[in-house]
Amino acid sequence: MIEATTHKAPQTVLLHTGLLPLLIFLLLIESVDAVPTISFTSGGANPTQINNLDPFDIQIDNAGHFSGIFHNNTKTITFTDFHFETKLIEFNLFTGDGGPFFKNVPEGTNKSLDFFQGGTGTGIAPSTNFTITGSGFQVNVNEKITAQATVPEPSALLLLGAGITGLALLGKSGVLKPSHRSWREENGFTE
C-alpha cells in the first residue's frame, strides 16, 4: 500500500509550530541588547573639513555602525564639547569614550550623547584630525546621527569674569570682611 504525504509550505510550518514568533523575538532581543556607543580617536587620513560649529549628519549603515574622519578646519576655535543626537529613540542609553579629547564618562540618554572637555580632556584644537566611530544603533533606512561641535559662549565667559572681578573688588574694599563686633553691639543692644 502506498501512502500519500502532503508537504506544507515553509510559511505555514513556521506559523503553526510557533517558530516565526520565536525568530521575531530573537531578532528583537538582538537589537535591544545593543548599546549605542560613540568613540573618539586622534588622527585619520582624508578627513571631512569642519569649518564652523554648524550641525552635520553622519550616515548609520545597515549594521548599525558609522565611522568618519574629520578635521577641525577653524583657525582659532578649540571644540570643547561635542553633541550627538538621533531621531530614533534607542532601547539603551548612549555611552562613549572621549579618547584624548574629552572626559571618558560622557552624559547620555537613549537619544543623545554629550562629550565635555572636563578636567581630563584637551578638546579638539584647530588643525587636528580626529575619527568618530559608532556602533550598536538601530538599523533603519536612511538613519543618521547629527553631530555638532560646541564651545563656551563668549558672553558666558564675560559674565563669569565680571562676577569674579566684582567679588575681588568687594573683598578688597572691606565690604566682605567679617566684623569683630556682634550684631547686638552694632545696633545698641548691650546689657
Image (cartoon, helix red, strand yellow):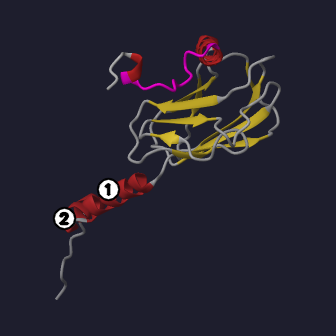
Along the line of sight, the residue nearer the viewer: 188 or 176: 188
Across and down, in percent, residue 134 comes to 59, 43
Residue 174 position (above or below residue 43): above
> Which residue corresponds to mark 2?
16
- Tell me, yes or no, if residue 9 can be seen here: no
**Magenta stretch holds residue 176:** yes
First to last magenta residue range: 173-184
Across and down, in percent, residue 133 comes to 64, 42
- Tell me, yes or no, if residue 123 can be seen here: yes
How many labels, in total? 2
Residue 47 position (above or below residue 25): above
Q: Secondary structure at mark 1?
A: helix
Quarter of the picture holding the C terminus: top left
Q: Amino acid at mark 2?
A: His
Quarter of the picture holding the N terminus: bottom left
Q: Secondary structure at mark 2?
A: helix
**Magenta stretch holds residue 101:** no
Across and down, in percent, residue 118 comes to 64, 37
Horizontal arrangement in the rendering, residue 125 relative to residue 17 (left or right) = right
Instruction: Identify the mark nearer the N-term, 2 or 1.
Output: 2
Residue at horizontal 36%, vertical 16%?
188
> Which residue corresponds to mark 1?
24
**Disc 2 to disc 1, how far (Cα)?**
15 Å
Name the dominant secondary structure of the magenta segment: loop
Residue at horizontal 34%, vertical 23%?
190
Along the line of sight, the residue nearer the viewer: 147 or 181: 181
Along the line of sight, the residue nearer the viewer: 132 or 9: 132
Q: Amino acid at mark 1?
A: Ile
Residue at horizontal 60%, vertical 16%?
174
* Contact flag, marks 2 and 1 (Cβ < 8 Å): no
Q: Quadrant of residue 165?
A: top right
Across and down, in percent, residue 52 comes to 69, 16
